[in-house]
Image (cartoon, grey):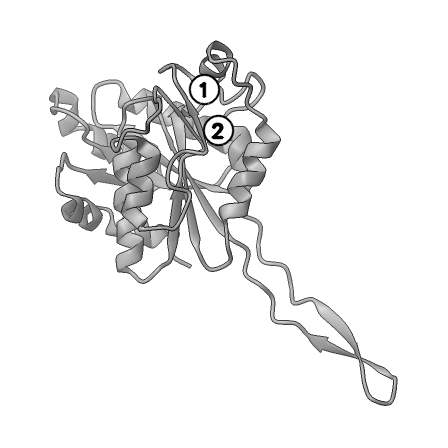
Amino acid sequence: MPPSRPSAKKATRTSQGTKRVSDEIPTPPPRVTLIVGTDTGVGKTWVTTAVARALQAAGQPVVAVKPIETGVSDPANPGEDGIRLAEATGQAGPMRALIRLTHHVAPAIAADLGSHPIDYDDLVARIRAIATPGTELLVEGTGGLLSPLTWSDNHLDLAHSLDAKVLLVAADRLGTISHTLMALRVLATEKIPVLGVVLNQPGPRDESSRFNASALTRLADPVPVVTMPHLNDEAQAAEAVKEVAGWLLP
């Protein structure tokens, strides 16, 4: 995010009719973190809910939202990503994804199949309306980094539109080194600030799991890499990402 603007000067009128300039207390800009994956199925929602709980445990107000969720239908299923995010924070809203699409494919394709065009500018405005000063807004992406949200916008565009920093989630499995480094290269080219990488364990370990974390720590430097083991307990997951939550704290 760009640095905070200097204090604005406000002219006021005295009882004698003259003006004086007084300092306004600057309002801190909303902090937005976009949580994106190197691929689909890497555990973005699990990581996002864990980070949200860790932030709350640290006393940081937080709201979490999924702008677009595919593969869902009405009535809403309690297991939907957007609902899980809201449950993790206990927020008043939004209670589910802002846009819900039936077909379980990339958002741009799902929108076409469902005759539900996505207005990107309106979506960004709806996300921005959720962000409030002093509250950390976690925005969970859909699919991988370059998954098309519309036919002309992806998560890189969303990061720019929201002035967001990125938390990259990767799966601890064979192939993740290349996938993660490619994503980091693209983010660097786009000059999008990256908080770090969470190397998540969404499934059984394979032989590469012995080496992925150390290799990425070496190759992605100076971007920090944190591992998250395969967990089913929410409290343990929040504890596992305390360091990650610290990256987001002011």
In the rendering, at what x and y percent does residue 22 appear? Answer: 72, 77
The crowd level at tag 2 (other Cα within 10 Å; few <14, some 14-19, many 20+) is: many
Secondary structure of the residue carrying numbered label 2: helix
The structure residue drawn at horizontal position 42% and vertical position 42%, both measured from the top left corner, is 94
The structure residue drawn at horizontal position 20% and vertical position 22%, both measured from the top left corner, is 173
Q: Is residue 195 above or below residue 169?
A: below
Q: Which residue is nearer to you in this view: 49 or 146?
A: 49
Residue 123 numbered tag = none
Q: Which residue is nearer to you in this view: 244 or 151?
A: 151
Mark-to-mark CA distance, 1 and 2: 11 Å
Residue identified by numbered label 1: 107
Image quarter where the C terminus lies is: bottom left
Q: Is residue 228 above or below residue 43?
A: below
Q: Residue furthest right?
A: 17
In the rendering, at what x and y percent does residue 70 appear? Answer: 38, 21
The image quarter containing residue 40 is top left
Q: Is residue 21 visible?
A: yes
Q: Is residue 78 above or below residue 206?
A: below
The structure residue drawn at horizontal position 32% and vertical position 37%, both measured from the top left corner, is 83
Q: Which residue is nearer to you in this view: 6 or 89?
A: 89
Q: Is residue 217 visible?
A: no
- N-terminal of the pair, mark 1 or mark 2, is 1
Q: Is residue 165 above or below residue 79?
A: below
Secondary structure of the residue carrying numbered label 1: helix
Horizontal arrangement in the rendering, residue 45 relative to residue 115 (left or right): left
Residue identified by numbered label 2: 155
Q: Amino acid at mark 1?
A: Pro
- Which is closer to the viewer, label 1 or label 2? 1
Horizontal arrangement in the rendering, residue 29 relative to residue 144 (left or right): right
In the rendering, at what x and y percent does residue 132 appear? Answer: 50, 54
Horizontal arrangement in the rendering, residue 20 relative to residue 194 (left or right): right
